[in-house]
């Protein structure tokens, strides 16, 4: 398998507080990789560092053989890494269609792509189509998450990073979201997934990393992690 | 009735100037939460650069430049001042975007003074007479006079505002502006170069203010390096009146303020003009700080 993204000894800070401590991880093409850990362990910081919202103090981030350190976020998006942030962060005052159009900002000159992308999103989530002209803020939590994922896909990601897509959603919606993530992966997009719901994440993922205080303390295939005592105790319930 | 209507027309013209300037105020506030106190000076800069170009092209000030020439001067001036707006953002504001709010606010006042006194050095402190005069003839509507020039200024302002509306509503850059006003980091994650869109916002704001600047030069006939100061504060008032951060609000706020001032001047006397404007500002800040449209329209831009 071809390595797509490789983090080596990355250190990131919030002011003086070190959030990532010599973190290393690797994602191969076509995988779903789960990033597990408790609140404040550094999962979101890892994604923000990859997408350029936080610049690491030291360490190397290699994407398709090129360094991403110091590259501004919009350039990283152009290179094919798309980060769907925690809490969905949809533009509540803009319509659903406008949200999707902005997701395709890097393709703004390609009207055909934007149009087809919107149609594809509506095929994936028919519920969005019914409300295309409504402000996105009027959507339910699950629908907002669907919009956030579709908006991410509008930028044609090679790697899609999802930060807690199931947060605050009813179990039945979580199932649907997980199904869609699997579907997106099957169509060729590599996925890095953060989940509180470790059970659901490990059912979906090929491999998983467990992160604690900004450092990877465990990584293995999802099958092995599901049986790991530490994971079971901490995240899956005994 | 004729007097009432007459004042209405006069108020509309002044209101249109206020609206055009208030738009820049409100857009910049919407996108980076800065009250750009230097904004009125782009209006002054527009008036002066328009003056310089017109003087250059029309020689001693005849009308021989023709409508086409005047139109070209308009557009060139607005673009030059728009670029100046971008320059100010790049040099003075961008390094402070992540600094505490107060630093950037004080910087705005510094920029304002720099622009004013740079113009004074360049063009002198005395009043300058605009090189073109508008013809006085016009229409009579139920006893009230409205000149063709006034109609022209109102129409031109309306066109600029409609153009802006379309830009904000329909183009991807306008949508990006509205999105940045809501969530800057999320915009970066869409591949939007946030700084470039902020820069574009300054361009448009200064562009519109410059348009108002030349129009007022043509309309009133004289310009001065301090002309942007009071009108900047008035436009700020208009923006607050409409609901700061709200585009439609700025347009309405400007017109309302223009009308209130004209009627106030007629019925109470000219010395009450500023008292009325800033009295309204205080009343709104105390009783309805969200402005006329602020609470209703949730989307801020």
Image (spheres, helix red, strand yellow):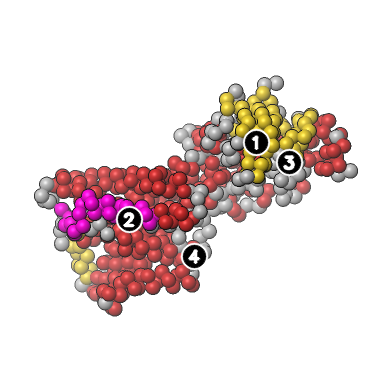
Q: Measuring from the top left, give residue B158's x and y in whole percent.
A: 33, 56
Label for residue B113? 2
Pinpoint the chain carrying mark 4: B
Q: Measuring from the top left, give residue B14's x and y in whole percent.
A: 29, 63
Q: Measuring from the top left, give residue B291's x and y in whole percent.
A: 46, 66
Discs 4 and 2 carry the same chain letter: yes
Residue reaching furthest to the front? A16
Q: Are marks 4 and 2 in contact (CB under 8 Å)?
A: no
Residue A141 in magenta?
no
- Find disc 4 in the rendering and name its residue: B290
Residue B113 in magenta?
yes
Residue ID at (48%, 72%): B287
- Find disc 3 in the rendering and name its residue: A213
- Find disc 1 in the rendering and name its residue: A11
- Density class for disc 4 (Cα within 10 Å; few <14, some 14-19, many ≥20) is some
Pick the residue in front: A234 or B21. Answer: A234
Discs 4 and 3 carry the same chain letter: no
Q: Quick check: can you spot residue A120?
A: no
Pinpoint the chain carrying mark 3: A
Residue ID at (37%, 51%): B205
Q: Are marks 1 and 3 in contact (CB under 8 Å)?
A: no
Tell me how many marks there are. 4
Discs 1 and 3 carry the same chain letter: yes
The quarter of the rendered structure image containing the N terminus of chain B is: bottom left
**Label 2 SS:** helix
Q: Quadrant of residue B22?
A: bottom left
- Distance between mark 1 and mark 2 Cα atoms: 44 Å
Residue reaching furthest to the right? A238
Residue ID at (15%, 62%): B136
Q: Which residues are magenta?
A: B108-131
């Amino acid at each position: 398998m071809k390595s797509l993204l490789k983090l080596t000894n990355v250190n990131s800070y919030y002011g003086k507080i070190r959030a990532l401590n010599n973190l290393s991880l690797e994602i191969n093409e076509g995988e779903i990789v789960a990033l597990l850990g408790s609140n404040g362990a550094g999962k979101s910081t890892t994604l923000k560092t990859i997408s350029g919202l936080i610049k690491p103090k030291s360490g190397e981030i290699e994407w398709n053989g090129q360094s991403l350190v110091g590259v501004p976020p919009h350039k990283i998006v152009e290179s094919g890494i798309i980060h769907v942030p925690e809490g969905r962060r949809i533009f509540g005052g803009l319509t659903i269609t406008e949200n999707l159009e902005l997701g395709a900002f890097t393709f703004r000159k390609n009207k055909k792509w934007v149009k087809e992308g919107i149609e594809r999103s509506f095929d994936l989530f028919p519920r969005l189509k019914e409300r295309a002209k409504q402000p996105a803020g009027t959507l339910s939590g699950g629908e907002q998450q669907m919009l956030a994922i579709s908006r991410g896909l509008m930028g044609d990601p090679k790697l899609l990073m999802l930060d807690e897509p199931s947060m605050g959603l009813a179990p039945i919606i979580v199932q649907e979201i997980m199904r869609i993530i699997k579907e997106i992966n099957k169509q060729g997009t590599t996925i890095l997934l953060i989940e509180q719901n470790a059970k659901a994440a490990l059912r979906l993922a090929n491999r998983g990393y467990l992160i604690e205080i900004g450092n990877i303390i465990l990584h293995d295939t999802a099958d092995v992690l599901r049986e790991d005592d530490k994971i079971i105790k901490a995240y899956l319930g005994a | 009735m004729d007097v009432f209507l007459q004042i209405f027309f006069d108020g509309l013209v002044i209101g249109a100037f206020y609206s055009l300037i208030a738009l820049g105020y409100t857009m910049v506030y919407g996108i980076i939460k800065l009250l750009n106190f230097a904004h009125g000076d782009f209006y002054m800069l527009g008036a002066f650069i328009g003056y310089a170009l017109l003087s250059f092209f029309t020689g001693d000030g005849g009308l021989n430049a023709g409508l086409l020439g005047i139109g070209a001067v308009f557009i060139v001036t607005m673009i030059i001042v728009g670029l100046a707006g971008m320059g100010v953002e790049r040099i003075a504001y961008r390094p402070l975007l992540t600094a505490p709010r107060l630093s950037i606010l004080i910087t705005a006042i510094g920029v304002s003074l720099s622009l004013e006194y740079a113009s004074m050095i360049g063009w002198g402190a005395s009043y300058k007479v605009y090189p073109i005069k508008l013809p006085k003839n016009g229409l009579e509507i139920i006893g009230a006079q409205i000149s063709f020039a006034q109609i022209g200024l109102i129409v031109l302002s309306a066109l600029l505002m409609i153009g802006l509306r379309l830009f904000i509503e329909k183009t991807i850059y306008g949508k990006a502006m509205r999105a940045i006003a809501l969530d800057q980091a999320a915009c970066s994650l869409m591949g939007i170069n946030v700084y470039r869109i902020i820069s574009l916002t300054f361009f448009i704001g200064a562009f519109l203010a410059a348009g108002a600047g030349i129009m007022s030069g043509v309309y009133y006939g004289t310009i001065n390096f301090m002309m942007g100061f009071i009108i900047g504060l008035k436009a700020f008032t208009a923006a607050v009146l409409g609901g700061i951060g709200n585009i439609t609000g700025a347009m309405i706020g400007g017109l309302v303020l223009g009308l209130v001032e004209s009627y106030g001047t007629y019925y109470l006397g000219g010395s009450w003009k500023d008292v009325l404007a800033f009295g309204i500002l205080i009343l709104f800040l105390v009783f309805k700080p969200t402005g006329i449209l602020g609470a209703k329209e949730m989307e801020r831009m």
